[in-house]
Image: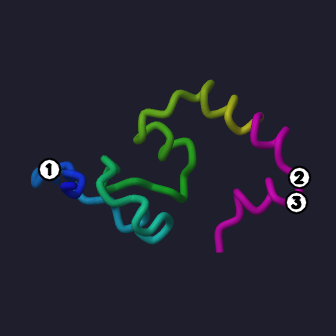
Amino acid sequence: MSPPVREAVDPWAPPASVDAKRSWGPLAEGLSVPRDLDLGDRAKALEQLGVNRLAHATIVGVVKDALPETQVGLLGSRR
């Protein structure tokens, strides 16, 4: 049986930003993340990533409903 074929890496794809690599580690590899992604400004970051504000608000609401308040608070903490 042959090993699975891996997708070719696009040599022209921009690398993940330094902030993305620091925050997400290997999970950010291969993502199309702007080099100047500003994780310190949530509204700007969401705009840079093309995230719809209403969709973001909906997901935040679902998370707040599903998780205990103490865990929800940890999601927004930055240390």
Residue 5: image location, x then y, percent: 19, 51
Q: Residues within 10 Å of mark 3 (few under 14, many from 20)?
A: few
Residues rendered magenta in the picture: 62-79
Identity of the amino acid at label 3? Thr
Q: Secondary structure at mark 2?
A: loop
**Quadrant of the frame with the C terminus:** bottom right
Pick whichever of labels 3 and 1 is earlier in the sequence.
1
- Please name the residue that numbered disc 1 is placed on: 10
Residue type, label 2: Pro
Where is mark 3, residue-wise? 70
Q: CA distance from mark 2 to mark 1?
A: 41 Å
Assign a secondary structure to mark 1. loop
Q: Verify whether residue 72 appears in magenta.
A: yes
Farthest-out residue, left: 11
Disc 3, SS: helix
Is 64 displayed left or right of 52 in the figure? right
Q: Which residue is mark 2?
A: 68
